[in-house]
Amino acid sequence: MIDFLTSRGFKIFFALFIAALLITAPFYLRNFGLYLIAMWLVISVAALGLNLTLGYAGQVSMAQGAFVGIGAYVTGLMTLAGVPWPVAFLCSGLLCFVIGWVLGYPALRVQHHYLAFVTLAFSTLVFLLMRNEEWLTKGIYGLTDVPRPILFGWNTGKAFDFYFFVLGVVTLLSLGVWWIIRSPWGRAFVALRENPVRALSLGVDTRRYTLMAFAMGSAIGGFAGALYAPLVQFFEPNSFALPLSLNLLLMVIVGGGGTFFGPFIGAATAVLLPEWLRIAQGYYLIIYAIVVMVLMLFCPTGIMGLGDRFISHFRQKRISAERAEKAKDMSQQEGK
Amino acid sequence: MMQPVLEVTDVSKRFGGVTAVDGVSFKVYEGEILGIIGPNGSGKSTLFNCVLGQLNPTQGSIKVDGHDVTGARPCDLNRLGVSRTFQLLQVFPELSVRDNLILAGQEHEGTMLDRLLGPRDAGLTASANQMIEFFRLSHVADEKAGGLSYGQQKLLDAAMAFMAGPRLVLLDEPAGGVNLTMLGHLRDRLKAINTEQNATFVVIEHNMEFVMALCNRIIVLAEGKIIAEGTPDEIRSNPEVIEAYLGH
């Protein structure tokens, strides 16, 4: 059973099953359902970026929400000015990459909660800029009527079309992140998280990888923002204030930091679960909070970690049984 | 005259009013196994950390193959062919044994961009497998390093130091906490690498039997200074060393 669950064939089957669900879902959902799943996908991308910085490279960041905001504002302002969405999308990622690289410098000097406070200060700074620089961001009135892209004559204005557009872009971004974490860079990021001193002694340029982890995670946050802007079409600075960064942190931790699928699961618990719990009316936030607390209490490595524990438990049991069997055979042979 | 692989000249390291290493000079030649012994607090590990760029020496110079590397970063030194193990175990527990070894070699392969766009194993699976076999870790090659026994992790730690085919390896208490069977195995592997690849080692060790059997030459440190230097037999019979460290 465990061998089957961890086999390559099962993983491919499971991936195809999820893909089929995501492709067929729009045919059974109304506009709000489509909006919700598109939002889950977009927020998953933002969490994927944070997962690269925090889950893989071990660098705490409480600024991912700010990068989603920067990406959203860049794309919103550019597309409102008539710039095509793909150009705005690339500019959002590039700007966040550069800012993320600069924000990575404090991580070369401070770690853990000290670093968290540096990024928290940055997040507040970005929020204040968005709110106060009205000449650029329209302040608390926010940006309205952000257009949805038209790509090679395909107008993604309707919810149905826009959903497939988001699905396509998110798939490409996810494949990109998957490639990074499967490459030697992913291994170097894990080394950075687990033991930077040893990594350095093995030739891993921890300074460069730290900056790269921040820059890439931030750029992916910016890309998420570039999708967020045309999805909601109206946003204001509060959308990207500290609660979003905290929520993204929660998604990575609840889903399972340092695993590829963790952010998707984490984003599902943060975006979809509260909606499903709405039948509980006023109690839904209480139930949601209790679910998260219980999960963290019994599985600090997140939902993906729970799966890993389940698999290693049964593997260990089997190995012990095999060892006992071997020892029994040997003692029988010695007896003869 | 043959150029030394490592040349340490008049190196000192002070922490405030405490002088941990005091004007130490020595040379290590290709194929040599140099042992550094001394009581706790004699400055052995501080000296190692100065040589390996983990600490900046207060004075003195360090040369590798004639190039001045004083104050160079550990990653740059590693790429120059200087590798090390630590006193306390330093493997990556969440990575498999094979991935630990690939990591230990991957930064020597191509540029950062090559490593991003190239194959996942940086073309090192075959070398990692060879190293796994050499250190007799084949049965745990796919296990997470954190799940191995202490002795196995110690072997992996040593294997990682050799993965990139270094010119010089500095081993900080390789025998610490290792049981007798594993210790003999570790000594055999180190001797084999030294003989087969003409590798050069500097070893800090408290286990006298291990260090006397492994090293060609030994330096004795006490209170940050070299108090004796010679072959294992000369060190064993040196009255100053017996007084300061070995005892009667």
Image (tube, rainbow, N blue to C red):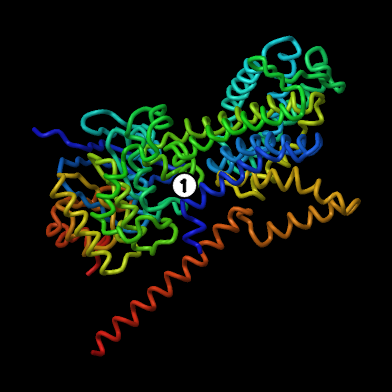
Q: Is residue A87 above or below residue B163?
A: above
Quarter of the image for residue A215 reads top right
The chain holding disc 1 is A
Q: Is residue B68 above or below residue A117?
A: above
**Residue located beneath label 1 in the image:** A195
Looking at the picture, tell me which residue is in the foreground, A170 or B72: A170
Residue at image coords 14%, 33%: B3
Q: Residues within 10 Å of mark 1 (few under 14, many from 20)?
A: some
Q: Is residue A74 visible?
A: no
The answer to whether A232 appears left or right of A152 in the picture is right
Residue at image coords 44%, 42%: A187
- Residue most extreme to the front: A27
Quarter of the image for residue A141 reads top right
Looking at the picture, tell me which residue is in the foreground, B55 or A146: A146
Indicate the position of residue A306 as horizontal and vertical percent values. 60, 58
Indicate the position of residue B160 as horizontal and vertical percent values. 32, 48
Indicate the position of residue B134 as horizontal and vertical percent values. 23, 54
Looking at the picture, tell me which residue is in the foreground, A72 or A58: A72
